[in-house]
Image (cartoon, rainbow, N blue to C red):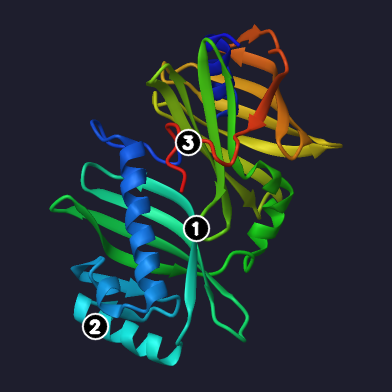
Amino acid sequence: MKLLRLCVMLLFLASSLAFAAAGEDPVQVETAIKKTIQSYVDAFNRGDAEALAAHWTKDGDYITTTGEVLTGQEKLKAAFESFFKDNQGIKIEVVPLAVYAEGADKAIEEEISTTTKEGEEPETTRYVTQYVKQNGDWKISRVKEIVPMGTSPNHDKLEPLEWMIGDWVDEDQSGKLETTCYWSADGNFIVRAFSVSVGEVTTFGGKQIIGWDPAAKQIRSWVFDTNGGFGEATWEKREKSWYVNSALVLSTGEKASSINILTPVDENSFTWQATSREVGGTPLPETAKVTVVRKPADSPPGDSNTK
């Protein structure tokens, strides 16, 4: 694959879970946040309320789905103590979703946490957690519980695209395209984020938001790239393939359009091809069909901040 093909694919498919601020290494942020999460899980599974509260800032708060707010380490410690007293032996498991670096000392993390207690059904909750860096350590400044996925009809309308969820890669000697696809915290949208790198340098990236348009009664998407381009598209399924009719405004001001065809091959691969392409009113030839593969589960993170 030529690097030009990579860039063209991104412009017309456009789908890094996060883009770190200048000078901030997203992989280092992700690694540090993961260590904090594991420390939190260990403290929870020990039933150590004091250690749990120490993971928060002094004025950090916890917000439930009902709007109840607990603020400050002391109140959080007391709440944890009461919780562990009533739920002896309870354990927690965290499934990380994403880390978003916001400057040098702030980050947002999304996760699904499952608590288990002997004799009871597991309980799963989705969270969005805000972190701040204080004296070299990442501390929790806010945790917000999210309404469980699947409660909205918009989520159900997007389930036919659930095969896209996960990390994908297309790579050769000229460069690497990495794409990460995940559910938004509320379950109403699918987010596709991408980055292109040559060697260790990220050259291009962007993010696509896929949702259900209840007025038009169809799947639509919106894309924004790191060069300042943006666009939208409508999605239509024809047999096994998805036809994505895209219209974009490039960073140069030129208008572009294409029909992108995504065809699942199996659970670990799909093909992509762009047809009916135009840039600035000039027709372009269709691209060759490209096979994109799922990244192995043990693959280290690239420019995408996947948790």
Q: What percent of the width, then of the height, locates residue 193?
A: 50, 37
Local secondary structure at mark 2? helix
Q: Which residue is mark 1?
A: 185
| Amino acid tagged 1 | Ala
Mark 3 Cα shell of 10 Å, populated few (<14), some (14-19), many (≥20): few
Report whether residue 231 is seen. Answer: yes
Q: CA distance from mark 3 to mark 1?
A: 23 Å
Q: Closer to the N terminus: mark 2 or mark 1?
A: 2
Q: Closer to the N terminus: mark 2 or mark 3?
A: 2
**Apparent side of residue 48 relative to residue 245 in the rendered image (left or right):** left
Residue visible at 36% across and 81% down in the picture: 68
Residue visible at 44% across and 56% down in the picture: 110
Q: Which residue is mark 3?
A: 300
Residue visible at 67% across and 45% down in the picture: 219
Along the viewing direction, whichever of 109 and 86 lies nearer the viewer: 86
Q: Closer to the N terminus: mark 3 or mark 1?
A: 1
Q: Which residue is mark 2?
A: 75
